[in-house]
Structure formats: C-alpha cells, structure tokens
Image (cartoon, helix red, strand yellow):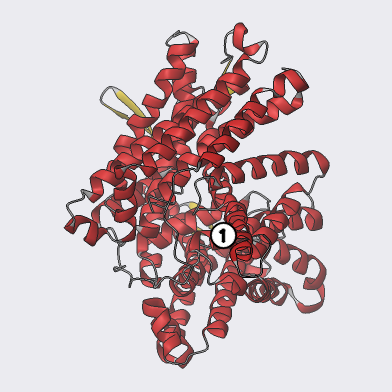
C-alpha cells in the first residue's frame, strides 16, 4: 500500500464514478418524471456499447473515430423514443408494478436482439486514437490518458444537464413534473411529448455511457442487469430526482470500491480481512447505511403523493363453495399426475418446479399486493431457506424432515432482521433496501467458501430414497405448497390481513384507528419470508444442490414477473402467473436459442392486452358475463 497506488486507484474510481453517473442521470430523470422503474436502462447501456462497436468498425475510416463513436448514443436515444411511443405510452394508466414488468420484458427482448445481431462472444473495440491511446506518469505509475477523458465526461454532462433543466422552458417543465406531474398536466402541458423527450434523453445518456466504454471494456451480453442494479443504487443513495445527489453518490460508491482494492488483504488482530472481496457489495453496504440514516437519500426529499391513475382495487373475498370445490378438484387432478404420467415423467418434474414457484410467488404477492411493500430482494428468503436446508443436512447431519422443518425458520429469522429495518422506509427506497440486503446475503454465500462452498455451492442434498425414488417428493411438494398458499390466504382474510391492507391504503388513518402499522408490516415480512424459505428448501431438495444463484437479483425479478403476470389484485394471481411463467420459460428455452425474446414478447403482449394480469382478466370476463346474464333481455 503506497501513496502512488492509492492515487491511481482513486483516479480509477473517478473514471468509474463518471460512467456510473452518466447511466444514473438518465435513470433519475426517467423515474423522477415518469415514475417508471426502468429495468431496461441497463440494456440501453449495453446497446450503446454494441452500437459503438459496429459504428466504429464500419464508419471510423470514413467519418473518423469520434463521430462514429458518438453516433451510438443518438441511435440509442432514438430507440428510447420509439420504446416510449410504442410501449410505455400505452400503459401509463396501469399500476406502476405492471410498468416494471413491461420494462423487464423489454430487457429479455433487447438481450436476444443483441445476441442475434452480434453473437454470444465478447467484442473488443479499438483503442482511442492519437494521444488518448497513451498513458501519463502518476508518481511512477502509468495511468491511461483516455480514462482522464472519461473522468471529465461526468462533470461536463452534469453541468450541461443543470443548464438544460434550469435555463430552458422544457427543463423547468421537467423539474415541475418531477415534483408533481399531475399538476403539470392540469396546467395544460402536453405530458405525453414531455415523457417522450425525457425517456429519449435518458436513453441517450445510457447509450453515451456505454459508447465511452468501448476503448475500456468489451461489449458483453451480461452487462445489462449488473449496470442497471448499480445505477439504481446510485440514484437511490443520491436521492430520487437529484442529479447532484446522483453525482455525489457515484463518487462515494466508486471511491469506496477503489479504497477496498487498494487496502488488499489486511490483518486486524486475529482476523484476516480481504477488502477486495467487499467490492461485490460495497454499493449495497453504502446504500443500506445511507437509507437507514437518511431515508430519502443524501440530497433527496420526500416525494409528493402520486394520485392513483389505475382502477381502484376490489376488496378480497373468501372463496365461494363452488370455488373451493374447484380448487379441491385441481389438487386431486395434480395429485393424480404421477399415476397418469409416471412418477419420473417430465411432467412430474416440471410440476414440482411450478409448485415451488407458486409458493414463492404467493409469498411475494402477499407482501407487495395486500401489503403494499414493494420488494426487489425477496430472493434473500428463498435463498436462506435453500441454504439453511442444505447446510443443516450437509454440515449439521440433520435428517431430511428436521432440515425441511428448520429451513423456514432460518428464512424467518433473516426476514425478522431485514424486515425490521425495511419497514422504516416506503416506496422505491424500501424496494432498494430489500435489494441491498439480498445482495449482501448473496455476496456472503458467494465468498464464504468454507461454509457455503462459494460459487460452487453445496451438492448432494437429496431427499431420502423413499421420497426421491418415486412420487413421494412430488406429493410432499404439492402438499406443502398447497398448505403454504392456504395459510397465506387465511392470514390475508383475517383481521390481521385487513389491518395490513389498511396500513397499505393509508398508514396515518390506520395508526389513528390504533393499528400498529410497523408491527403489522414487520409480521408480513416474517410470514412471507418463512414461506419463501420453505419454497427455497423444497427447491434445494428437488435439485439436489444449492448455489448463490438462488439469492441473485434474477430470482427476485422472476418472482416479480410471476406475480405481475398473474395479477396483483387477485389471490389466485401469483399461482396463475407462476404456472404460466414456468411453463413458458421451459417450453421456449427448449424450442429456440432466442427464447428470451419470445418470452419477453409474450409478456409484453399480455401486459398490453390484460393490464390487470391473467387472473384479473379472467375475473373481469366472469363479471362481464354475469352482468350480461342479469341484464333485461339477457340469456335466461
């Protein structure tokens, strides 16, 4: 650890901060004005890098390196405008979570589009021309000149955006919409074109960030999710809608990572700490600390209440005798599958995956639907249950039954800790704090090789032969998942469930009625965490192994997709969504290399046709049929 190495690492941090800010600035503008959690923003960054590669390769010899490079953000900005006009404009009146599902589907489509256009291999661009290809001396160490240019890009863009937002009429409208977009519309401003301009500008900034990375890193299909996660962290830490806050947050996070790399492995008393390993979770540790200290971010402030544009949600009702009979018939039919198709048939294996996904989705639905507690990190409890079961069997030598029973308790313990901290926040800040805790848990599983097996995970976690050799495990999974869903349904229809909905609809009114809002929400975290942990334990035993993937962001996103695809406003929604999503994923993945694009296209079609989800549309159709039947002159 020398002064020169510290200075070089800090300079590397500044270059990384500049890139991160460019991505986060566009994301902050889009969310601040449009209230859309744009999961596709990382895909726009990825496309900026790919388009820059192609434009430089084919056009640099004709128009020069820099014009060819800067063509990429213009293309991505134009694509952003098309996306807003063709897709997002059609779902502005849909629930915000459904808009999130649409952007998630867009991620799938754009990833496969990039795969089709550029192939699966990483693509390395040329070095910057002229003097920018060299390096400067920093206390005896070499530092790339091009990185100095990247470092300057962030402050320059911040200055230009500040001038745009404060010195132009369009910028003043954008700032006004950030504070209260409904009032802006009431004043006669054409919001649709304002939204188009904001989304195109945000896409252009993401494309610019990607294009500037061409001489620094290869274009890769795996960039999208990693980049958008870091960008969301920066936006939340800085404060939603604050460009200056995003800039400060990017600096803090990038320099914390740089310091971790510089410190290396340090002996602190009896402990040997490898600081470079902390770079995997540095931004999430910073975010958790900032949000627990300042719930609105470093330079943010409480958002104005957003007026409800979507249709009011109908109250939950207990199942009718006919519906109960239908559910019992469905359970009986599912129980008969091993006899009809064979205990080891592909249908039985796939249905076990559906049961597990349904329990996981139902637990998440109870949290984000009736609970109103948006979570981007529900995989934490799924993974804690999976790892809890695997560790109890592998290291604790517990029998299968005890390990399966104890796994939900492990997940519930994690939910008790995480939920107690999360209920202090609300909205996007709550969602991002759940993501932070999930990523911290994932990093522990990834790096604690001695206990969790690291990236290899834990193998050899199978149920006993009496269950694993026939239909026993199938029936066990069906019974436990059905019992878990029934428990959730009963809880949500109980007085506690009514209190949870009251806290969601109006926390001040609920508190005035004597409801312990935080206590009720905390209990929701623990209950849903335990059931997600049960799903995780069943997953571990069904696959015979567990790896850090069970804790990854993608697992949480899949759960959200299942809930939103089925419908948030119906208790059957997550079950229908889990079945549809799992079946589509399996069928398309076996049919074509570009299954993501097909899956994303189908999800987009369902979002546009059935904005209330599959289950919500079915309920609407039943209600419409009943109205026609009861109308004068209707069918007898």
Of residues 68 and 264, which is closer to you in this image? 68
**Residue on which disc 1 sits:** 612
Q: Where is residue 240 in the image (x, y as percent from the top left)?
A: 38, 66
Of residues 362 and 270, which is closer to you in this image? 362
Classify residue 378 as left or right of residue 290: right
Q: On screen, 245 above or below 229?
A: below
Q: Position of residue 613 (x, y in %)?
A: 59, 56
Quarter of image, res 128:
bottom right
Q: Residue at x 62, y 21 (%)?
A: 474
Q: Tell me the quarter of the image containing the C terminus.
A: bottom right
Q: Is residue 214 visible?
A: yes
Q: Position of residue 356 (x, y in %)?
A: 57, 31
Q: Is residue 450 visible?
A: no
Classify residue 577 as left or right of residue 433: right
Q: Residue at x 36, y 52 (%)?
A: 287
Q: On screen, 439 above or below 294?
A: above
Q: Tell me the quarter of the image containing the N terminus.
A: top left
Of residues 368 and 180, which is closer to you in this image? 368
Quarter of image, res 158:
bottom left
């Amino acid at each position: 650890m020398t002064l020169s190495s510290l200075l070089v690492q800090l300079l590397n941090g500044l270059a990384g901060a500049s890139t991160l800010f460019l991505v986060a600035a566009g994301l902050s503008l889009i969310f601040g004005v449009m209230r859309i959690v744009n999961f596709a923003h990382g895909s726009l960054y990825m496309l900026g890098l790919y388009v820059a590669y192609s434009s430089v390769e084919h056009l640099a010899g004709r128009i020069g390196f820099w014009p060819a490079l800067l063509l990429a953000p213009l293309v991505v900005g134009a694509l952003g405008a098309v996306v807003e006009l063709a897709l997002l404009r059609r779902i502005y009146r849909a629930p915000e979570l459904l808009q999130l599902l649409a952007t998630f589907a867009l991620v799938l489509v754009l990833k496969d589009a990039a795969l089709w256009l550029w192939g699966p291999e990483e693509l390395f661009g040329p070095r910057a021309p002229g003097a920018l290809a060299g390096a400067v001396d920093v206390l005896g160490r070499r530092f790339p000149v091009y990185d100095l240019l990247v470092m300057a890009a962030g402050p320059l863009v911040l200055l230009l955006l500040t001038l745009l937002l404060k010195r132009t009429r369009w910028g003043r409208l954008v700032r006004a919409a950030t504070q209260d977009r409904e009032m802006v519309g009431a004043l006669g401003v054409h919001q649709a074109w304002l939204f188009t301009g904001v989304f195109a500008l945000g896409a252009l900034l993401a494309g610019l960030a990607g294009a500037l990375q061409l001489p620094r890193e290869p274009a890769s299909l795996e960039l999208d999710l990693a980049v958008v996660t870091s960008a969301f962290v920066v936006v939340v830490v800085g404060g939603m809608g604050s460009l200056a806050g995003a800039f400060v947050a990017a600096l803090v996070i990038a320099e914390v990572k740089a310091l971790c790399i510089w410190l290396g492995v340090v002996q602190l008393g009896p402990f040997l700490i490898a600081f470079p390993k902390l770079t995997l979770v540095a931004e999430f540790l910073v975010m958790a600390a900032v949000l627990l200290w300042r719930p609105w971010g470093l330079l943010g402030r409480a958002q104005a209440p957003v007026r409800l544009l979507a249709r009011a949600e109908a109250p939950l009702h207990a199942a009718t005798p006919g519906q109960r009979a239908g559910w019992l018939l469905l359970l009986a039919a599912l129980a008969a599958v091993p006899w009809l198709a064979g205990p080891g048939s592909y249908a039985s294996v796939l249905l076990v995956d559906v049961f597990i996904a349904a329990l996981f989705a139902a637990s998440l639905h109870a949290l984000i639907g009736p609970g109103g507690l948006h979570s981007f990190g529900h995989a934490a409890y799924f993974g804690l249950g999976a790892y809890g079961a695997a560790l109890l069997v592998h290291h604790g030598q517990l029998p299968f039954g005890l390990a399966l029973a104890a796994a939900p308790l492990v997940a519930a313990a994690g939910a008790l800790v995480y939920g107690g901290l999360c209920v202090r926040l609300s909205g996007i800040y709550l969602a991002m704090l759940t993501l932070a805790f999930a990523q911290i848990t994932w990093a522990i599983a990834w790096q604690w090789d001695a206990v969790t097996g690291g990236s290899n995970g834990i193998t050899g976690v199978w149920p006993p032969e009496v269950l694993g050799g026939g239909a026993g495990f199938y029936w066990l999974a069906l019974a436990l998942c059905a019992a878990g869903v029934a428990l959730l349904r009963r809880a949500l229809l109980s007085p506690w469930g009514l209190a949870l909905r009251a806290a969601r609809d109006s926390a001040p009114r609920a508190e005035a009625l004597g409801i312990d809002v935080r206590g009720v929400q905390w209990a929701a975290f623990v209950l849903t965490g335990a059931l997600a942990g049960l799903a995780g334990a069943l997953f571990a035993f069904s696959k015979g192994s567990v790896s850090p993937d069970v804790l990854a962001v993608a697992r949480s996103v899949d759960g959200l997709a299942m809930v939103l695809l089925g419908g948030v406003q119906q208790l059957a929604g997550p079950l229908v969504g889990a079945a549809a999503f799992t079946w589509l994923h399996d069928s398309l993945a076996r049919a074509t290399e570009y299954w993501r694009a097909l899956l994303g296209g189908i999800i987009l079609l369902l979002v546009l046709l059935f904005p209330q989800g599959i289950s919500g549309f079915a309920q609407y159709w039943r209600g419409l049929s009943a109205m026609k039947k009861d109308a004068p002159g209707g069918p007898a």
